[in-house]
Image (cartoon, rainbow, N blue to C red):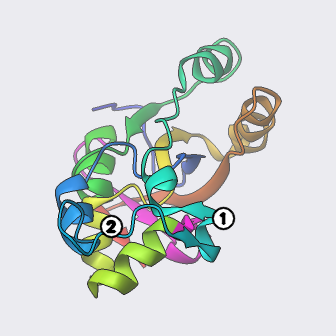
Amino acid sequence: ENDNVKAGDVIIALPSSGVHSNGFSLVRKVFSIGSEGSNLNEYVESLGGTLGETLLTPTRIYVKPVLSLLEKVNVKSIAHITGGGFYENVPRALPEGKKAVINKADVRVLPIFDLIAETGNIPVEDMYSTFNMGVGMIMIVSPEEADKTIEILKANGEDAYIIGKIEEMDEKITIC
């Protein structure tokens, strides 16, 4: 928890490379992995490769870009989006009395998550509470430092972008 986080601060997303080892029990169930009907080697147009290749994409590691950023910007709080998705992980980055407002339309959802949702008929809220949806990490910075933060992260190979802001409230997260 970070008491420096204020209403109006900006939430910046660092893209994930895919499922990142979270929610695999659901993934196995949705795609019948381990059973006769599994289609891991089938090419999937929306993924640009096979389901198996996509699911085995290595997890992105953010250490170097983040360390570079921390030398130049006052990052107020950071959270990995791991098991438990947005609903469990984003609130960890917030002090009492603040909530994150995530704009779903701004989240760059990776095709694998659309495929999981469609194939398994999984509601959007369940997807956001299980998976990273294409966001591997979030950072909270003041609005004045948002552009600089994105610029530094992009210079370090991360296609960072804004997905929301911080507001005063008791609820910890709203995805709208």
**Where is residue 88 shown, x and y percent of the image?**
22, 52
Magenta residues (range): 94-111
| CA gap, disc 2 and disc 1 | 23 Å
- How packed is label 2: few (under 14 Cα within 10 Å), some, or many (20 or more)? some
Is residue 33 covered in magenta? Answer: no
| Residue pointed to by mark 2 | 128
Secondary structure beneath disc 1? Answer: loop
Is residue 108 covered in magenta? Answer: yes
Residue 128 image-quadrant placement: bottom left
* Quadrant location of the N terminus in the rendered image: top left
Disc number for residue 161: none
Secondary structure beneath disc 2? Answer: helix
Tag nearer the camera, 2 or 1: 1
* Quadrant location of the C terminus in the rendered image: bottom left
What amino acid is labelled 2 in the image? Tyr
Instruction: Name the residue rendered at 33%, 39% in the picture.
Output: 93
Q: Is residue 70 above or below residue 92?
A: above
Q: How many numbered tags mark residues here?
A: 2
What amino acid is labelled 1 in the image? Gly
Is 143 or 86 nearer to us in this picture? 86
Tag 2 and tag 1, C-beta contact below 8 Å: no
Q: Quick check: 140 left or right of 28?
A: right
| Residue pointed to by mark 1 | 48
